[in-house]
Image (spheres, grey):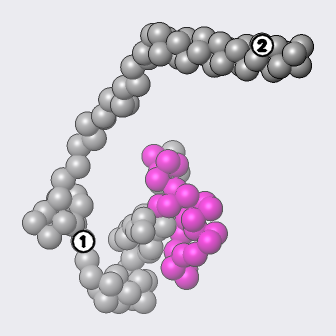
Amino acid sequence: MKKQQRGTFKLLTIGGTLLVIAAAVLLMPKQSVEAPSSVNVPDSHDNDGVPYPEVPRISLEDAKARYDEQSAIIVDVRSEEEYETSHIPGAYSLPVSELEARYQELPQNVEVLTYCT
């Protein structure tokens, strides 16, 4: 009989504990989880989806011709890591984050063609 009472007592204790935990969870104040506020970053695209259509562009053929004629240099404005991974042969590495401080390192008598992708 005592074994049966102990078993019943354990069952009631476990059931009571689960009931208290369930009540605590249900009665806890709800914390609102808000999505981060969006940041309005100005961006412009033309009808074809080309970003910043106001920035002058030239074709790859024209860029290569100007580079081959030595009338232009090619500047990779991506990070050093991206440049090390892959870059156009002969391109200068000048990350955009350093451009303002280091642009004077570039030759002055040629056209500067930049790329970032």
For the point 17% across and 59% down, the residue is: 45
The circle drawn on residue 47 is: none
Residue sitting at x 47%, y 61%: 77
Examine the rendered structure and indicate whether residue 44 appears above or below residue 48.
Answer: above
| x and y percentages locating residue 85 in the rendered image | 62, 72
Q: Position of residue 55 (x, y in %)?
A: 22, 61
- Whether residue 107 is visible: no
For label 1, count other residues whose C-alpha is less than 10 Å away and answer few (under 14), some (14-19) or many (20+): few
* 2 lies left or right of 110: right
Q: Is residue 35 left or right of residue 11?
A: left
Highlighted magenta segment, given as a residue range = 77-100
Quarter of the image for residue 65 reads bottom left
Q: Is residue 36 left or right of residue 58?
A: right
Which residue is most to the right?
A: 2
Q: Residue at x 62, y 62 (%)?
A: 81
Quarter of the picture holding the C terminus: bottom left
Q: Where does label 2 land, which residue? A: 9
Q: Residue at x 42, y 65 (%)?
A: 116
Residue kind at label 2, given as amino acid type: Phe
Verify whether residue 43 appears in magenta.
no
- Residue 97 belongs to magenta span: yes
Percent across and percent down for residue 13 are: 73, 13
Q: Secondary structure beneath disc 1?
A: loop
Which numbered circle lies on residue 57? Answer: 1
The vertical placement of 114 against 52, above or below, is below
